[in-house]
Amino acid sequence: MKNIIKSMLDEIAAMRSGHVMPYHKVSIVVAGIIALLFSLVFSHSTVFEGKIAVIDLDASHYSTELIQKINTSPYIEVTQVFRAPVNPETLTAHDRNLGVLYIPKGLEKSLKTGDSTVRLGYFADHSNSSQNAEVLQNLSEYIPEIGAEIGAARIAALRLGETGTEAALSPMQLKNRHLFNPTSTATNSTSIAFIYFFSSLFYGLATLMIVGRLRMTGAWENDVFTRGPLALLCRIVPYAFFYTTGITVISALLVTFGQLRFAGNYFYYLPTIFMTGLAFGWLAFILAWSTQHPGEGASLMTFLVPPGFIMSGATMAVGYLPLWAYYVSYAFPFVWQYRFYRDFAVRGVSIGEMLPTYGAYLLFLTAIALGVVLLYHRTQKRLG
């Protein structure tokens, strides 16, 4: 126990020495800056006033009225209207517009006579498909609603009544409800994801440099291999503590003063952050085991945090991954952490339901710890 405490105090002293990253300060400052920055930059995760151009070949009174109605939607802004054919690729170049709405000639005439269905076209710029999904969804809902208003007058002549008219116009409808983040606030999606990402990034840099620093100072042989493998593993504990503290303090501020929604019990969730800190730190030991100086360890960051962030579902749908990649992704601690976050914070899952995931994560931590212990004994034999 004495050796374990000495090892942890050595790491706290290193943080405060001024010669390495002062992680006890960085853990709070980074999370705070990222929370402030992304709260200012992103207000919602929904595209408001998505810019589109319109090619209006009908050039009629009704087509003008239709364009005005679309433009009044809070989700769509009509930037340009053309009365002649234009290449839609030109109109979407340089991100001027997210897409182009095409109104064919004969729109007003067809609507008045009712002899055929008019089909409007939409050219979606899928160089950024996530942005266009919002605009396309709103157009797909808005255009049929406007069309139903026109058909209502004709069907009303049949004297079906209000309910019968609605049934004739739309015999089947889909009503949806957005669970967990109904207001589409970016605090519950983009901002919190980047708080975890950048906090993990700086944490990874700090822990990846430990082995190189111990080698350069002579502590690798003099202290590490005289105190035992458990003392080496416990060198990560102060870092994991500050990592947990930084994320928890900023999350509490966002819940209290911002729009962050935490549906579950934070005290049941709290151990997962500390466990992720341990997992990152021990994996950093394995990755940086043969490094000779801190800079060499820091260069291995690419293999520690970013892959887990990409495959965690924080920025892209997990369903995009092939089955083998989905299972491989659980080799990265960030994937585990974000799975816990979605279940505890967003969905409000109870601790009882999360116990199997906790158990699996403990097995994952045990496997990493055993990897460090095996490396320790193999190196100890070589040194001895």
Image (cartoon, grey):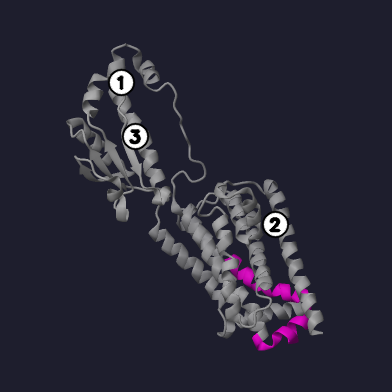
Inter-mark Cα distance, 3 to 1: 16 Å
Q: Main secondary structure of the magenta part?
A: helix
Inter-mark Cα distance, 2 to 3: 46 Å
Depth check: 87 or 76 in front? 87
Label 2, on which residue?
361
Q: Position of residue 382 (x, y in %)?
A: 79, 82
Label 3, on which residue?
142
Label 1's element?
helix
Q: Position of residue 23 (x, y in %)?
A: 57, 75
Q: Indicate the quadrant containing the N terminus: top left, top right, bottom left or bottom right.
A: bottom right
Depth check: 29 or 200 in front? 200
Mark 3 is surrounded, within 10 Å at the Cα level, by few (under 14), some (14 to 19) or many (20 or more) other residues, namely: some
Q: Which residue is pictured at 53% across the width and 63% down the height?
A: 197
Q: Is residue 240 a member of the stretch shown in magenta?
A: yes
**Residue 66 visible (yes or no):** yes
Disc ID at residue 64: none
Q: Which residues are magenta?
A: 216-245
Q: Looking at the picture, does residue 360 appear above or below residue 8? A: above
Mark 1 is surrounded, within 10 Å at the Cα level, by few (under 14), some (14 to 19) or many (20 or more) other residues, namely: some
Q: Are marks 2 and 1 in contact (CB under 8 Å)?
A: no
Q: Indicate the quadrant containing the C terminus: top left, top right, bottom left or bottom right.
A: bottom right
Q: Position of residue 180 (x, y in %)?
A: 52, 44
Label 2's element?
helix
Label 3's element?
helix
